[in-house]
Image (cartoon, rainbow, N blue to C red):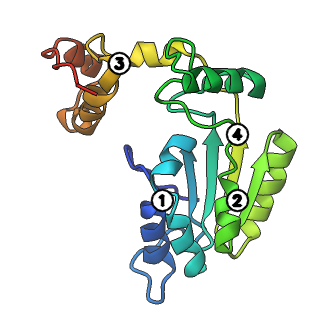
Amino acid sequence: MRVHTLRWVVGLGYAIAAHCVYNLPGPEAKSGPKPGQKKIVCLEGDSAFGFSMAEVETMSRFRMDILIFMVNNGGVYHGDSADRDAWMKLQQNALQGKTKDGLRSSSLGWEVGYEKVTKMCGGKGDLVHTPEELAKATEEGFNAKVPVVVNVIIEAGKADKLVRLSSPYCLKSCEYTMWNGLMAKYDSLGLTLEKAIAWMNTSKKPKEAKL
């Protein structure tokens, strides 16, 4: 099997393009020694999936049998809590204006049922928590003739990951503004991740955003 990957590709639009270039009549590309239908497989997080979730409707409308593994940890980079009760407590604090003990701005919902979007559009969706459920969903997904979203629930992760990746100059009101801009350019500059973070930390401190 030949696998093509691109870095910094966010969203499902690329999967649609890949399906078209390999599977439309008179395909423009080939992969592997055998001709015929190619299964397009996506692997992305719940944050990335949210950017272009509506593309699942396009896939369903044109019967594109794309298989999407959506790794769900309840947030950007990581989630906020290890169980539903703790998450709901943070949510309640946020609703009461307790920003210190509330949900982060980069939090997402608790075990959101993204797979239901595919079902509503005419595709197939599975919510999995165990290796056994994942194995079953994977086999069914590869055999399906419609788009499939496998919503894989994993642990929320550690909060220190954001600290390691954030510049000290990233203010709370614009936490990822510089980081996102950096990610768009550091590949083209040939920088390692460590050098990119060092460049970010020595950049001019941004003005505080007014909310």
In the image, 137: left or right of 33?
A: right
Q: CA distance from mark 4 to mark 1?
A: 20 Å
The residue that mark 2 highlights is: 116
Which label number is shown at residue 133? none
Q: CA distance from mark 4 to mark 3?
A: 25 Å
Can you tell which of label 1 and label 3 is closer to the viewer?
3
Q: Are marks 4 and 1 in contact (CB under 8 Å)?
A: no
* Label 3 residue SS: helix
Q: Identify which amino acid the numbered label 3 is placed on.
A: Lys
Q: Residue furthest front?
A: 96
Q: Residue at x 46, y 57 (%)?
A: 52
Q: CA distance from mark 1 to mark 2?
A: 16 Å
Q: Identify which amino acid the numbered label 2 is placed on.
A: Lys
> x and y percent of residue 43 in the render?
57, 49
Q: Are there few (<14), some (14-19), or many (20+) residues within 10 Å of tag 2?
A: some
Can residue 34 be seen here? The reply is: no
* Label 4 residue SS: loop
Q: Are marks 1 and 3 in contact (CB under 8 Å)?
A: no
Q: Are marks 3 and 2 in contact (CB under 8 Å)?
A: no
The residue that mark 4 highlights is: 111
Earlier sequence position, callout 1 versus callout 2: 1
The answer to whether 190 is drawn above or below residue 132 in the figure is above
Q: CA distance from mark 1 to mark 3?
A: 30 Å
Which label number is shown at residue 12? 1
Task: Locate the N terminus by quadrant.
Answer: bottom right
The answer to whether 50 is drawn above or below residue 53 in the figure is above
Q: Identify which amino acid the numbered label 4 is placed on.
A: Glu
Q: Are there few (<14), some (14-19), or many (20+) residues within 10 Å of tag 4?
A: some
Q: Residue at x 23, y 13 (%)?
A: 201
Can you tell which of label 4 and label 1 is closer to the viewer?
4
